[in-house]
């Protein structure tokens, strides 16, 4: 798996990049999110190579960030003197796009399965907000440990709560 390259440790530490000093391998694997023109691809790779070198100039907020997607969002706003755009804007956009890809569709399939169980032949005209409410109710009951342990609160019976959306 190449996405671990986009973690903070790999991004900011040159010694962690012995396996893959370039992002070309990820760009080849992700052709739909990778820019099609060679110039932008080269810019992304150049920014990737400059990142550990610029580590000392990065704001403390970036250095203290432990969440990978937040790190890339913070890095996208970093500007150095004499630069019009962000110093790592193309790299950050690519990294966020790569990290936002679903790694499996099991969660999506689980939701579709739940929706299909809710929408039976007699209940097939439900609107989206009703289905969403049923799914949220099911989730709340499951979190509570089942219907026996679920304790509804007064706000669950409030009319404003029902019709908030």
Image (tube, rainbow, N blue to C red):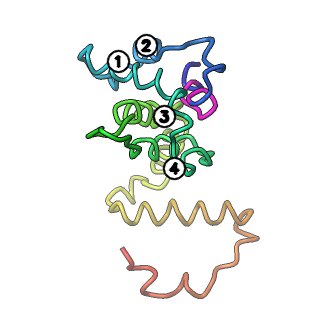
Which image quadrant: the C terminus?
A: bottom left
Q: Is residue 32 above or below residue 76?
A: above
Across and down, in percent, residue 164 comes to: 39, 78
* Comes first in the chain, label 1 or label 3: 1
* Comes first in the chain, label 4 or label 3: 3
Q: Nearer the viewer, residue 104 or 148?
A: 104
The residues tagged by marks 2 and 3 sit, at their Cα atoms, a distance apart of 16 Å
Quadrant position of residue 8: top right
Name the residue beneath numbered marker 4: 114
Name the residue beneath numbered marker 2: 24
Please report the residue visible at 58 percent of the width from the left and 31 percent of the height from the top.
12
Quadrant position of residue 85: top left
Q: Nearer the viewer, residue 16 or 55?
A: 55
Q: Could you tell me what secondary structure mostly forms the magenta stretch?
A: helix
User: Mark 4 or mark 3, which is nearer to you?
Assistant: 3
Relative placement, left or right, of 138 versus 102 is right
The residues tagged by marks 2 and 1 sit, at their Cα atoms, a distance apart of 11 Å
Across and down, in percent, residue 119 comes to: 42, 54
Please report the residue visible at 26 percent of the width from the left and 40 percent of the height from the top.
84
User: Mark 2 or mark 3, which is nearer to you?
Assistant: 2
Q: Which residues are magenta?
A: 5-11
Across and down, in percent, residue 106 comes to: 55, 36
Name the residue beneath numbered marker 1: 31
């Amino acid at each position: 798996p190449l996405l671990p390259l986009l973690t903070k440790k790999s991004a900011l530490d040159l010694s962690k990049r012995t396996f893959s000093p370039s992002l070309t391998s990820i760009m080849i694997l992700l052709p739909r999110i990778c820019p099609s023109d060679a110039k932008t691809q080269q810019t992304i790779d150049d920014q990737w190579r400059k990142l550990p070198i610029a580590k000392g100039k990065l704001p403390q907020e970036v250095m203290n960030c432990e969440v990978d997607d937040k790190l890339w969002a913070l890095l996208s706003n970093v500007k150095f003197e004499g630069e019009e755009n962000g110093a790592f804007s193309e790299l950050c956009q690519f990294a966020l796009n790569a990290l936002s890809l679903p790694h499996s569709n099991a969660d999506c399939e689980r939701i579709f399965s739940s929706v299909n169980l809710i929408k039976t032949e007699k209940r097939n005209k439900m609107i989206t907000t009703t289905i969403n409410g049923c799914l949220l109710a099911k989730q709340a009951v499951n979190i509570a440990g089942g219907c026996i342990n679920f304790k509804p609160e007064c706000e669950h019976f409030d009319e404003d709560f029902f019709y908030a959306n």
